[in-house]
Image (cartoon, helix red, strand yellow):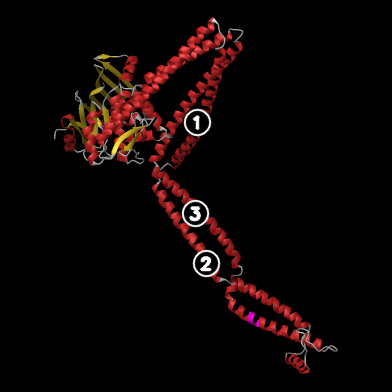
Amino acid sequence: MLRLTSLRLTNFGPFKGDQVIDFPEEDGVVIVYGENMRGKTSLLNAIRFAFFGRILGRGRRDAALHKVGNWEEAADNQIYGFEVSLDMTHAGARYRLVRTFKPRPGVTEPEDDGDYVQDYFLERDGIVLGRHQSKIELERILPEQIARFFLFDGELLQEYEDLLIAESDMGPKISEAIERILGMPVLTETRDSLTAAKERAENRHARAAQGDQKTREFGNQLAALQSERGVLQTDLERQEKDLDGLKMRKTALEESMRKMQRVTALFDKRDALVDDIDKLKLRVTEKKERLSGSMSAAWCSLLSERMRAALVEMKARETQLQTALIRTSVLASLSAEGETSCPACLQPVSEDARHRVQESLAQHGGSAGADEERELAAVRRRIAALEQFIGDANPQALRLEWDSISQDEREIYAKGNEIKVIDTQIEDVDEEAVRRIRMDLESAIRQISLLEQGLNKTRESLHQNGVYRDNLQRKLDKFSGSSFDVERKRRDLAADLETLFTKGIDIFREQLRRKVEADATTHFLQLTSEPDYASLQINDSYGLTIVHKDGSEIPVRSAGAEHIVALSLVGALQNNAPLRGPIIIDSPFGRLDATHTDKTVAALPTMAGQVVLLVYEDELAPARARAGLKGQLKSEWKLERRSARHTELKPRKD
């Protein structure tokens, strides 16, 4: 079991000069109290740096090391770089690991990581090991691939939620790391060795077939298929590696986008406002064009009353002229020889009526002729023109059109002011960089989609290759011969061993999953305050679902519930892992209420032999921690502020 005994920091982050924290050698919990920005995360990163030579920033990405050195020492004394020394025990031996990050010789004012040199050495029981042996020992003590289960924070706990999401990019990575801590790689690597042995046996079998006249054609085909399989397998490995790289890039870009969520929302809002303004301006232009055509007759509205009066006069004159022309026509018809009926109504016309028509014509100027007909046509043209002008005279419609244009222009002005406010909020933001990240993310998603399609085709080709090879192998098995029999037996033995081991791995993996499920349930029931929760149910990726006492699954979980489930998984993995070590947690109670905090504190000693908590007092009050842990609380430390760039590690005595 790995146990930390001492951590010495020299100008690491806010820890100015040499500072040391000693860990008790017996099982229990150590608590380090510190307010925000005092150095809790720096302590976690110092241990990570000692083991792996790297530190993590937000989004689980590597952070620049040249920014880690103590700022006050650099500013006041021009002392750059830092050193971390870690004392520990493992498998009965004592180790001291020292890793440094110092300026290159001749560099007086380093500016980036390239101006520094990183170095380390490892002592075992007081003897300095060689570089190659040190690398082997460190990989044995704490492989980097499983470090997430020993050194983690609230952000890492959230990643475990991805184990329940089938299409998650991070889920398979965490699942792979879980199997590594549980010791599965030893078995899978053995299986892979047996697969390679089977392939070698198949190749020998194919070569033996090529040497026999009866089976040469089969042997040649089999050799060609095996050669094709090698190419396809190489392509598959390359594609899988490329896909892993793209998914890691996508995850990093998504994290960058999440960090810039507010900024990107402002950019999106501004772009939408610009688009709205463009549409409004186009609409205003179209309305003004329509209004320009309408304004050519706008003068009509000023003369509409006079035109209506003139129209009345014109219609009266039209009636008068039309009557005169009709009466003249009637009278002319009646004057014809023998005619006694009206030509219009075909009724008999008396002599008295004839005289009245003649008198009426005389009173109105006499008989109407060609001049009246021309005047009537002219009057009708004037009436038509007046009616058109009066129809065009619609001031209300013009007023509504002007009001609509004014409303659009006010909206353009208001949206323009919104854009000015947004521009003020993002004036210090590199807009091009934000857009580039978004474009890169979209590009990565497209590339992942294309690569996954290519992977599916390669896997299908490998499957077809296997089908063809199996058919050829069955045909070859019908032939006998000394060389065939020996190579066939070797091939069959290798294939049987691979099949046996593969089935054994599947059985062991399932048994291991069930043990993790049972232990996680035990931890979960210790941690949760909900009496209706009965257990946890594990999936193939080691994701855990809460099960109600009625047997149904809890589909939606709160942030606090996710936190409890993740802690339960970590405890279960510690219980079942061949490699045991300390749990060092940064701010583990941020999403928990008081009840769950108390339960978690009480359960921590059951999760690992050595637990180190990095908390602030409002997150876990010292009195609450002492009451919950009792004799399991082995030591308390505090991070005391000396300045914004200077924190000191002190044993807590109050």
Q: Alpha-carbon neighbours of circle 3 within 10 Å: few (<14), some, or many (≥20)? A: many
Name the side, left or right, on which 104 lies relative to 273: left
Q: Mark 3 vs mark 2: which is more N-terminal?
A: 3
Per the rendered image, the range of residues in magenta is: 310-314
- Percent across and percent down for residue 515 are 31, 26
For the point 38% across and 26% down, which residue is it? 176
- What's the mark number on residue 277? 3
Q: Alpha-carbon neighbours of circle 1 within 10 Å: few (<14), some, or many (≥20)? A: some
Magenta stretch holds residue 211: no
Quadrant of the frame with the C terminus: top left
Magenta stretch, main secondary structure, is helix
Identity of the residue furthest to the right in this view: 337
- What's the mark number on residue 313? none
- Percent across and percent down for residue 448 are 48, 33
Q: Mark 1 vs mark 3: which is more N-terminal?
A: 3
**Circle 1 residue:** 452
For the point 44% across and 42% down, which residue is it? 431
**Circle 2 residue:** 400
- Percent across and percent down for residue 601 are 22, 34
Quadrant of residue 622 within the rendered picture: top left
Helix, strand or loop at label 2? It is helix
